[in-house]
């Protein structure tokens, strides 16, 4: 059975994550708004990738929810529309970005580059330069 096969999980079974791209450790405060709502929910970005991120929050929204997400790091901010791809009660949710504006695509690229570099730094602190 392939990883992409749709099955109905047994009650209490953990569903595999379905990511389209790599994600890197990242830490940023976030605001999540359900589209059509004014209520802002606090979250923390713990992983980031070119197509989405993981938002840690106590009461994640339902899978399929259309949201607007905004997060702040390194004196910059990023915002875009997104969809909740999977939700883990009392833990958080994985989201897929959509309709990113060009400016925020550039912000995201810079953060991803920094995350890739920091992930691949030598552990002994030596650097070949």
Image (spheres, rainbow, N blue to C red):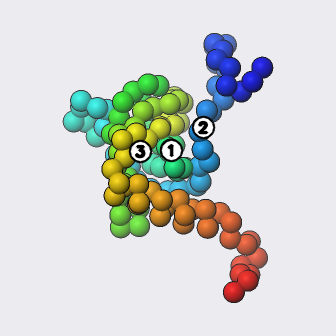
- Whether residue 85 sits left or right of residue 129 in the image: it is left
- The total number of labels drawn is 3
Quarter of the rendering containing residue 122: bottom right
Residues under labels 1 and 3: Cα distance? 18 Å
**Mark 1 or 3, nearer chain start:** 3
Judged from the image, the secondary structure of the residue bearing numbered disc 2 is loop
Q: Does residue 98 appear in this view?
A: yes
Quarter of the rendering containing residue 105: bottom left
The residue carrying mark 1 is 51
Q: Are marks 3 and 2 in contact (CB under 8 Å)?
A: no
Q: Quadrant of the C terminus?
A: bottom right
Nearer to us in this view, 99 or 9: 99
65 above or below 101? above
- Whether residue 100 sits left or right of residue 110 in the image: it is left
- Percent coordinates x, y for residue 110 in the rendering: 47, 64
The residue carrying mark 2 is 19
Sort mark 3 into few (<14), some (14-19) or many (20+) by Cα contacts within 10 Å.
Answer: many
The residue carrying mark 3 is 43
Q: Are marks 1 and 2 in contact (CB under 8 Å)?
A: yes
């Amino acid at each position: 059975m392939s990883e992409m096969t749709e099955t109905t999980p047994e009650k209490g079974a953990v569903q595999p994550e379905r990511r389209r791209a790599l994600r890197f450790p990242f830490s940023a405060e976030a605001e999540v708004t359900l589209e059509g709502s004014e209520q802002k929910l606090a979250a923390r970005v713990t992983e980031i990738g070119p197509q989405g991120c993981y938002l840690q929050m106590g009461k994640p929204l339902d899978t399929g929810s259309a949201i607007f997400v905004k997060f702040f790091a390194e004196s910059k901010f990023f915002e875009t529309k997104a969809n909740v791809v999977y939700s883990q009660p009392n833990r958080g949710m994985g989201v897929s970005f959509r309709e990113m504006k060009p400016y925020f695509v550039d912000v995201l690229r810079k953060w991803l580059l920094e995350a890739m570099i920091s992930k691949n730094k030598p552990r002994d602190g030596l650097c070949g330069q």
